[in-house]
Structures are given as structure tokens and as C-alpha cells.
Image (tube, helix red, strand yellow):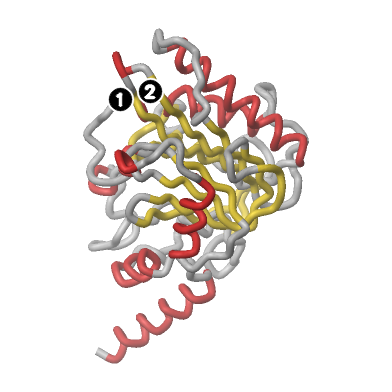
Amino acid sequence: MRYYTRKDTLFIRGPFSAASTGPCGGLCPVSTVVLYSPGETHVPHGDPCREITRQVSREGLPVDFFGLVAGNDIRRLCIVQYDYTTVFIQASAGVDDQPDQVAIIAYSGEGLAENALLQMIVTVTSAKAMALINMGLPVSSTTDDHVMVASEGESRHKEAGLQSEAGWRVYESILFGLPHALHKEDRGNGPALYVYSRLGGGHFVLWRPGECPYYPCHFPGQRCDYCYCPFYPCKDETLGQWVNGSNGGTVWNCSRCTLLHSPEQADYLRSHPEASLGEMKKNEQNRVKKQDLF
């Protein structure tokens, strides 16, 4: 999965199995998931599919997509990462800070069976309701409230309810993330990224490169834009290896990989978000050769 923003649009790319309740939705494989947030220019009674198709075509992407329109600034987007799941929450508040629109995209880096994709929609809706209850707000929904679920890989998870591994991660992410999406905070100029950390006990933390206590973890002057690598798990044994996990099984460990930490590589991937791992490795080899020449 790879995600990036272009002005007022979030693009999430990958070979997805997906389900969506949105106007440009359904249940089928797609290569792109889109959240279009034109802010105050949003016309609720317009044709959302036409607007989203325009954004996808402008980006030069294929038109096999699911899309949502959320009338809020894309910079207010809240992203919550919990292991292999990532939740994107776009929420706008109306009178008395009550939500007047909530759009949620839940992603699993481990494959969900078709029934699990549909169960995850129920899980997301339940989490949204509980988050509102915890904030003392009425549990309400509008015709603009929608959910999208996407996963990659073979169907490892047959269930995605609250008792399931994937469902619980998404549920907890929404309980944490929805209040932060509704209430404006000092997050800088872009979407806020929260990640689940087990250091000092399990909790979500706002990730800011300049405030990382481990900087520099690789070398002075490194860039940390992609500390949470979009290629993970790449399974490329020249960059990482499988190790025994603390909860049993194996996990992909790439703590020694510096592929995306050079300023040149970070800038390249930002400018070319569709770049493959092989392309990034070739660029790195060329960069090292140039350094050796001087």
C-alpha cells in the first residue's frame, strides 16, 4: 500500500480487494482508493463520481477505483497505524462540535476474505458509534457518512469482527483517531500520523520526525519521511530478514535498511510515488557510485 496527497485529494494505491458504501463503491478488486476533500468548494448535490473520476484521470491513474468525497480540508486528515492496519479518518464538525460528516477508510496489509471485508464495515461503524458515545456526542449518521475497506494479499483473515485480530486493531484505531480528527490540533501543515508503539506500554503516539528520541537511528543528516516504509514488508533479503516475533511466528525486520533515508531518495519517492522497490534500489546504487567518484 502506498498513499500520498495531491492538493485536496488522498490517493491510496495497491492491488486491493475492497468494499465501499460510497457512491463510487461496491465489492470488487481496485487499484486505487480515493478521498477527495475540496473543502468549502464541495457541492453536496453534485455528482461525486464525476468529481472523483476527474481527480483520478488528472493523476494519470487507471479508473478502477473506489472513492469518497469529504467536505473538509485534506490537511485535517487523521491517519492511525496499528501494525499491519491503517485507518484514514476525515471528519468535519458542525454546530457545538458535533460531527456533520465522517468518512473512514480501513486498510489491512494482510488479506481479508470477502466476508471479512464486509464484516470490517460493521466493525468500523460500531467503532465510530462508540467513539461518539465516549465523547458524549449523539450517535448519528448522514448520507455523506461512508466507509471503505481495502486489503492486500491472500485471504489470511476469514473474520473481521471485534473478536478478530484485524477487527480489533481497526476498532481501537478509530476509538483513538476519531476524536483527534474532529478536534483541531497543532499538527503542522499536513495530515496527522499516529502510530501504535509498545515502548513503555501499548499506546498511540503522534509521529513527528523532528521529535523522534532515536534520531539519528542510521546516520547524521538522514531523512525520516519514510520511517514507516511504504514497501513494508518488502521481503527483499538484501534489505531485511525474517525474525521470531514476540507473540510467536515471524515478522519482517528491516531495522538496518537505509534505502529511503537519504535526502535524495526521500525526495525522489515524494516526486514519484508510484516508483517500485527495484527502481528505488537502482537509484540508491547510482547515488552511491556518484559519491564514490567524488
Q: Is residue 106 above or below residue 289?
A: above
Looking at the image, which is closer to me, 15 or 102?
102
Looking at the image, which is closer to me, 42 or 244?
42
Q: Name the quadrant containing residue 160.
A: top right
Q: Is residue 225 left or right of residue 119?
A: left
Q: Is residue 127 above or below residue 57?
A: above
Residue at left 40%, top 23%? 100
Residue at left 41%, top 69%? 272
User: Alpha carbon of mark 1 to alpha carbon of mark 2: how far?
Assistant: 6 Å
How many residues crowd around disc 1 within 10 Å: few (fewer than 14), some, or many (20 or more)? few
How many residues crowd around disc 2 within 10 Å: few (fewer than 14), some, or many (20 or more)? some
Whole-percent x and y of residue 30? Answer: 64, 54
Whole-percent x and y of residue 99? Answer: 39, 21
Q: Name the quadrant containing residue 23.
A: top right
Callout 1–callout 2 Cβ contact below 8 Å: yes
Amino acid marked by disc 2: Pro
The residue tagged with tag 1: helix, strand or loop? Answer: loop
The residue tagged with tag 2: helix, strand or loop? Answer: helix
Q: Is residue 243 left or right of residue 192?
A: right
Looking at the image, which is closer to me, 144 or 262?
144
Residue at left 61%, top 47%? 109
Residue at left 30%, top 17%? 95
Could you tell me which quadrant the N terminus lies in? bottom right
Whole-percent x and y of residue 151? Answer: 64, 46
Looking at the image, which is closer to me, 257 or 271?
271
Does residue 3 appear in this view? yes
Q: Is residue 152 left or right of residue 136?
A: right
Q: Which residue position is annotated with label 2?
A: 179
Q: Which residue position is annotated with label 1?
A: 183
Amino acid marked by disc 1: His
